[in-house]
Amino acid sequence: MAATATHPDATSKPTPLRLTDKHGRAITDLRVSVTDRCNYKCVYCRTGTEGAQYAELPIADYLRMVRVFVSLGIEKVRLTGGEPLLRKGLVEMVAALAGMRTSFAADGAPLAAGAGQPLDIALTTNGHLLEDLAQPLKEAGLGRITVSMDAVNREKFARITRVPDSFDKVLAGVRAAKRVGLDPVKVNCVLLRGFNEDQIVEFAKFSRDEGIIVRFIEFMPLEEDRVWTPEVVVRLKEILAALNKFQPVMPLAPNAASETALRYTFADGLGEMGIIAPVSHPFCGHCSRVRLTSDGKIRTCLFSQFDHDLYGVLRRGGDDAALAAFIQRTVNQKEARHHIGEPDFLKPSRSMVHIGG
């Protein structure tokens, strides 16, 4: 049975304790994959083969599981995929999430029902369908958006995504998101040696010209094709060297202790770049995340070897208390860190598209 505490204003129902793992990390961020379908076949993610089997649950079931997570202290929900904009009912799901409120104060004290702040709702997309959906998503309550865009050169973009004629759609989607106020708009670029390392400076210029935040991500071993090697990774030190060759960069303070990106701007204050460096500079010690896959499994780390079937509890008729107890037991098993590059490292049992970004 889950541990509980009683709110001082409550007269009957106990309140579950806030999620904390056995390493003392508060778990406040939930990433929810609403589909593992995608309209891209990026070289660092998918094999590009046809006939794959996909997993999606009813939106109502995702929402029920998220509500239980929120009752345990989740403050931020990011919708991912696959490609989440392919999912029917996504706008309505955002609207439902926008009606949920946090359950704990900043000091960890439980709050009365409805007393907390609205959830921080974000979404990660490849941007192909974003231009038409930016306004409806904003009106539904989406707060922030991140677009995966791995080149600002059309030919390189097509080579990485293996989808022709999409670059202009993504660019229009980025601009639409900014126009409707999905701020801050972030663009994520996964760097792979031999594909797009020459895009670092071009993305810096893009950040300055478009007024958006660009984040470079070190390539992690999460792809279906199993092509990852240490030599393919473009590391933080190399990224900073390229940026400094263009113009001197200055570090920026993190927005939060659990932020994954090291933030930088140029000396003139124009443009913002982040570098997410899980390979060369792991940030596991302040990780605040868990993931819910599109088939309802909890992943405590991207590099876990195990899934934890939360949806199985729901499907067997478990009530919210049973779901909460399962979540708490699972989070308590969250790994201390990943082991990328170490002799005992094992690639995760599922690739990124099946885990959720």
Image (cartoon, grey):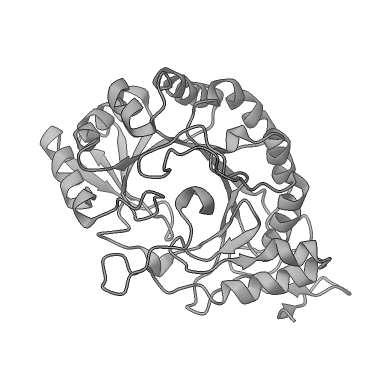
Q: Residue at x 66, y 64 (%)?
A: 104
| Residue positioned 27% across, 44% down in the render | 264
98 or 58, nearer to the observer: 58
Residue 342, located in which quarter of the rendered image? bottom left
Q: Residue furthest right?
A: 12
Q: Is 275 situated left or right of 89 in this image?
A: left
Image vertical order of residue 249 relative to residue 8, above or below: above
For the point 43% across and 38% down, the residue is 48
In the rendered image, residue 37, in percent from the top left (x then y), is placed at 57, 40
In the displayed structure image, the side of residue 248 where residue 285 appears, left or right: right
Of residues 117 and 164, which is closer to you in this image?
A: 164
Residue 252 placement, left or right of 100: left
User: In the image shown, does 23 or 232 lie closer to the viewer?
Assistant: 232
Can you tell which quarter of the image residue 166 is in? top left
- Asked whether residue 199 appears in the rendered view, the answer is yes
Q: Position of residue 229 (x, y in %)?
A: 24, 55
Q: Position of residue 26 (x, y in %)?
A: 53, 69
Looking at the picture, does residue 266 appear above or below residue 177?
A: below
Q: Is residue 356 visible?
A: no
Which quarter of the rendered picture does the N terminus lie within? bottom right
